Image (cartoon, rainbow, N blue to C red):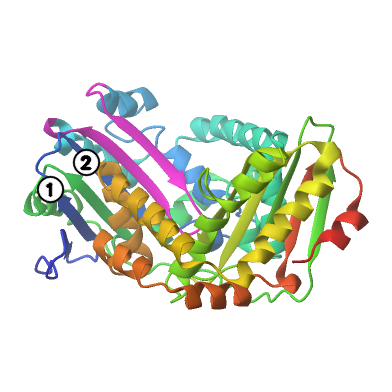
């Protein structure tokens, strides 16, 4: 077991157990809650086309029963009986299981999380029942145009790559996943060296380490498989249009972005804040307030290990879709002309202020530490990020806007009662 480390000025501590399991904590004495997150370095980008959706399937199955808690009700009752919350999520590059409870119940619930990940039984009948649930979940997602437009956009950004597929897989791939495939997948990825346990709340680091040492010391280490790198380079703009008889036309416009540790990350994040995050953003003011083209219009940034995306989404009146697309693209293109100092300063205050407010919640702190440790191997403190954001200059955002917001990299997905693909293609320029 490594000696607990806490660099100067840092509120988090880290210990690595002898089997490679990383334990990170942040002691927050004034809170009454504790949030425990167990993060595994596996997600949809680790899957072949044939096993697409298996990480998500496993995430569902570990809630179905363990050797000591053989029913889903016994698992949920352990947490809900304390007033706590138990949940999980599968993403492209990680799977997380988390639990937030009142401080007196944290030891029991930490034991539950470990039990779920180490001793789930994967009972065959439960696997078949959950298969039907997962297919219905995929059907539901396909029924919602705002979800479908995101799926089309991913396919364009990352063609023939796991990032371009739905995290849940397809009905066909889910139908082909069996118990043995799940167990083999878990044996490859659910290993101590590929796991981070992140705990935030009114508990000490040493107490968490002691508990996990007792629960996990006999968990044998092994190496996990690597993820698939992105090699696709886009050379021309593209449009995907899916006709549906809906009340709104849903559209999404994106360009490739930058990875999570890229030096231009903060500059691109601030461009998104300026463009479409908040009611004072350019898109909200121009598209909604001045022209009344959309109720919901916003931008966002995704950062992965080796790639990313800068995205704008909106739901608009089908009769005004072309006007909406043109207006959005004009606002995106205008970012390349430069950002006034006062507008950049306002975006910095919004970005850092929202981040600091999130740090009031133990769940947010637990996720903050766990995600960074798992994906990058280091944890930035909120003050580090504030400093990084505040260091961005108007010259930085001007350069990044012109590097990233390029006509040849544009992608647009449209779902709704529209058929004018060629007209949309002609509009697709900044």
Query: Mark 1: which secondary structure?
Result: helix
Residue depicted at x 50% and y 50%: 55
Q: Which mark is residue 211?
A: 1
State which region is magenta: 81-104
Q: Is residue 364 left or right of residue 276?
A: left
Judge whether residue 90 is colored magenta: yes
The quarter in which the N terminus is drawn is bottom left
Number of residues whose C-alpha sits closer than 10 Å to that of mark 1, classed few (under 14), some (14–19) or many (20 or more): some
Decide which of tag 2 and tag 1 comes sooner along the chain: 2
Label 2: how many residues lie within 10 Å, few (<14), some (14-19) or many (20+)? many
Q: Quadrant of residue 320?
A: top right
In the rendering, at what x and y percent does residue 182 appear?
Answer: 49, 49
Judge left or right: residue 113 versus residue 320: left
Q: Is residue 163 magenta?
A: no
For the residues labelled 2 and 1, the Cα–Cα distance comes to 8 Å
**Residue at the spot of label 2:** 110
Residue 273 at x, y percent in the picture: 50, 56
Numbered-mark total: 2
- Label disc, if present, on residue 19 of the rendered structure: none
Q: Residue 422, can we see it?
A: yes
Residue beneath the point at 21% across and 57% down = 24
Helix, strand or loop at label 2? It is helix
> For the C terminus, which image quadrant?
bottom right
**Residue at image point 45% right, 35% down:** 123
> Which residue corresponds to the image point at 87% horizontal and 42% vertical from the top-left?
418
């Amino acid at each position: 077991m490594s000696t607990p480390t806490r660099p100067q000025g840092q509120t988090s501590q880290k210990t690595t157990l002898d089997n490679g399991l990383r334990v990170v904590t942040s002691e927050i004495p004034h809170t009454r809650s504790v949030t425990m997150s167990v993060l595994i370095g596996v997600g949809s980008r680790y899957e072949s086309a044939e096993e697409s959706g298996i990480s998500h399937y496993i995430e569902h199955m570990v809630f179905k029963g363990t050797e000591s808690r053989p029913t889903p009700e016994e698992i949920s009752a352990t947490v809900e009986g304390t007033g706590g919350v138990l949940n999980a999520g599968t993403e492209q590059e990680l799977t997380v299981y988390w639990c937030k409870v009142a401080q007196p119940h944290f030891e029991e619930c930490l034991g539950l999380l470990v039990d779920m990940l180490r001793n789930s039984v994967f009972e065959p009948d439960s696997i078949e029942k959950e298969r039907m649930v997962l297919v219905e979940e995929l059907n539901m997602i396909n029924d919602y145009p705002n979800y479908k437009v995101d799926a089309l956009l991913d396919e364009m950004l990352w063609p023939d790559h796991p990032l371009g597929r739905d995290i849940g897989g397809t009905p066909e791939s889910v139908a082909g996943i069996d118990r043995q495939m799940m167990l083999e997948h878990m044996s490859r990825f659910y290993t101590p060296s590929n796991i981070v346990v992140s705990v935030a709340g009114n508990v000490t680091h040493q107490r968490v380490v002691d508990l996990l040492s007792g629960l996990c010391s006999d968990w044998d280490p092994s190496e996990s498989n690597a993820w698939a790198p992105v090699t696709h380079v886009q050379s021309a703009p593209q449009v995907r249009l899916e006709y549906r008889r809906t009340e709104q036309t849903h559209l999404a416009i994106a360009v490739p972005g930058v990875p999570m540790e890229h030096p231009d990350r903060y500059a691109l994040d601030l461009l998104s804040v300026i463009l479409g995050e908040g009611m004072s953003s350019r898109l909200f003011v121009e598209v909604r307030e001045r022209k009344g083209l959309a109720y919901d219009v916003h931008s966002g940034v995704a950062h992965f290990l080796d790639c990313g995306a800068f995205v704008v989404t909106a739901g608009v009146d089908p009769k005004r879709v072309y006007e909406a697309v043109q207006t959005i693209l004009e606002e995106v293109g205008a970012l390349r002309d430069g950002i006034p100092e006062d507008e950049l300063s306002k975006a910095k205050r919004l970005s850092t202020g929202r981040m600091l407010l999130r740090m009031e919640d133990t769940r947010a702190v637990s996720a903050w530490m766990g995600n960074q440790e798992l994906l990058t191997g280091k944890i930035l403190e909120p003050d580090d990020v504030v400093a990084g954001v505040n260091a961005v200059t108007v010259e930085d955002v001007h350069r990044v806007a012109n590097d990233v917001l390029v006509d040849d990299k544009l992608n647009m997905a449209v779902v709704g009662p529209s058929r004018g693909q060629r007209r949309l293609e002609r509009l697709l320029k900044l």
